[in-house]
């Protein structure tokens, strides 16, 4: 009987959503600003839970640019999306990227990206 109760409790517990994970990013500079590409992995279930954006931050956590993702990527994992024309401070050597999901909002983890030197 005890196993039955444990099974019923587990079945009644809602599934816990997980933060989207940034598994890679690149930055290239052009005359129009920076082009940032970010690769994200997330256990998406469809419209009810998906990675719906990412943002670029400075060391203090101020937002320098945001990429909104308008739909789930259930069958495209991991996936890469870019943001062009990003204006970064001239002295910036590093940026941080944070992902967002439709369920949990902005994640706690930040991905650190060292910018290539400006020539």
Image (tube, rainbow, N blue to C red):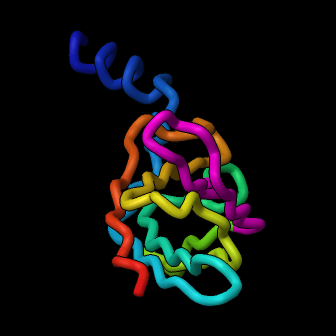
Residue drawn at (65%, 61%) of the image = 46
Bounds of the magenta segment:
50-71
Q: Residue furthest left?
A: 2
Left or right, residue 7 beside residue 41: left
- Front residue (pair 82, 118): 118
Is 92 placed above or below 26 here?
Answer: above
Q: Residue furthest right?
A: 70
Is 68 placed above or below 10 here?
Answer: below
Question: Magenta segment: does it hold 55?
Answer: yes
- Where residue 50 sits in the image (x, y, percent)? 61, 56
Residue drawn at (39%, 46%) of the image = 110
Tell me the quarter of the image containing the N terminus.
top left
Residue drawn at (53%, 48%) of the image = 57
- Front residue (pair 45, 36): 36
Left or right, residue 108 beside residue 34: left
Tell me the quarter of the image containing the C terminus.
bottom left
Residue drawn at (48%, 72%) of the image = 38
Question: Magenta segment: does it hold 43?
Answer: no
Left or right, residue 8 beside residue 79: left
Total number of numbered labels? 0
Is 110 placed above or below 44 here?
Answer: above
- Front residue (pair 71, 22): 22
- Where residue 53 sits in the image (x, y, percent)? 64, 57
- Where residue 22 sits in the image (x, y, percent)? 40, 60
- Front residue (pair 99, 59): 59
Is 93 placed above or below 48 here?
Answer: below
- Where residue 61 sits in the image (x, y, percent)? 52, 37
Quadrant of res 117: bottom left
């Amino acid at each position: 009987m005890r196993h039955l109760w444990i099974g019923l409790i587990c079945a009644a517990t809602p599934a816990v959503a997980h933060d989207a994970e940034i598994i890679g990013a690149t930055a290239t500079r052009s005359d129009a600003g920076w082009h940032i590409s970010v690769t994200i992995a997330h256990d998406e279930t469809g419209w009810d839970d998906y990675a719906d954006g990412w943002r670029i931050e400075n060391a203090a956590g101020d937002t320098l640019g945001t990429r909104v993702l308008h739909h789930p990527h259930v069958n495209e994992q991991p996936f890469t999306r870019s943001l062009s024309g990003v204006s970064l401070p001239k002295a910036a050597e590093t940026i941080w990227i944070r992902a967002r999901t439709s369920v949990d909002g902005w994640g706690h983890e930040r991905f650190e990206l060292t910018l290539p030197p400006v020539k």
